[in-house]
Amino acid sequence: MSYLMSNYAPLEVTFVKGKGCYLTDTKGEQYLDALSGVGVVGLGHCHKDITNAIQTQAGELLHTSNWYHIQHQEALAKKLCQLANMDATFFSNSGAEANEAAIKIARLHGHANNIDNPIILTANQSFHGRTMATLSATGNEKVQNGFAPLVSEFIHVDRKSVV
């Protein structure tokens, strides 16, 4: 019996270690990691410099709330804004949180420009996350089933009609 909720149907493989872009399963078989996990940054596995940087940072300070100034975060935000000619950044913990923020920003922009019901277009057969807004943005009824009522003001279009 599994104690995990069944939001995915896992394949019959269990990975026990990684090196570079490869994963090794419990049987010693190697696989090219073409996914790098769901909703995570693909940094590879066990790269010496990345492992050392993580260990060094964990030895200094692992996490603080955004209620406080975070030097490295502020330095990265400044660099990203300079490179991308942006005014501000928002760091998030997942793709769903990033998409949720984008939805909020789009709606704020619409309201600031006197659009009472801003509409957001998303693609059919898309996946945007498991929060209520990102689930509503997802253009896939199979994923949405059982969660109504969904957040309104999303229109799902075929990818061909968007291009």
Image (cartoon, rainbow, N blue to C red):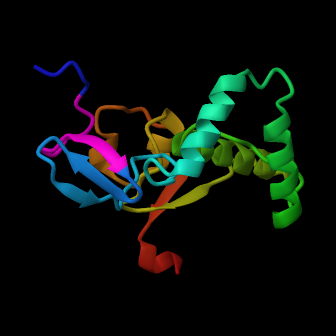
**Residue pictured at 44% horizontal, 42% vertical:** 135
**Residue pictured at 63% horizontal, 27% vertical:** 58
Residue 28 is left or right of residue 158, and the answer is left
Residue 62 in view: no
Quarter holding the N terminus is top left
Residue 53 is left or right of residue 143, and the answer is right
Is 84 in front, or is 163? 84
Magenta stretch: dominant SS? loop
Say above or below: 148 vs 17.
above
Q: Position of residue 132 (x, y in %)?
A: 48, 34
Is 98 in front, or is 105? 98
**Residue pictured at 24% horizontal, 58% vertical:** 31
Q: Is residue 11 magenta?
A: yes
The region drawn magenta spans 6-18
Residue 32 is left or right of residue 150, and the answer is left
Say above or below: 105 vs 157.
above
Q: Position of residue 119 (x, y in %)?
A: 62, 54
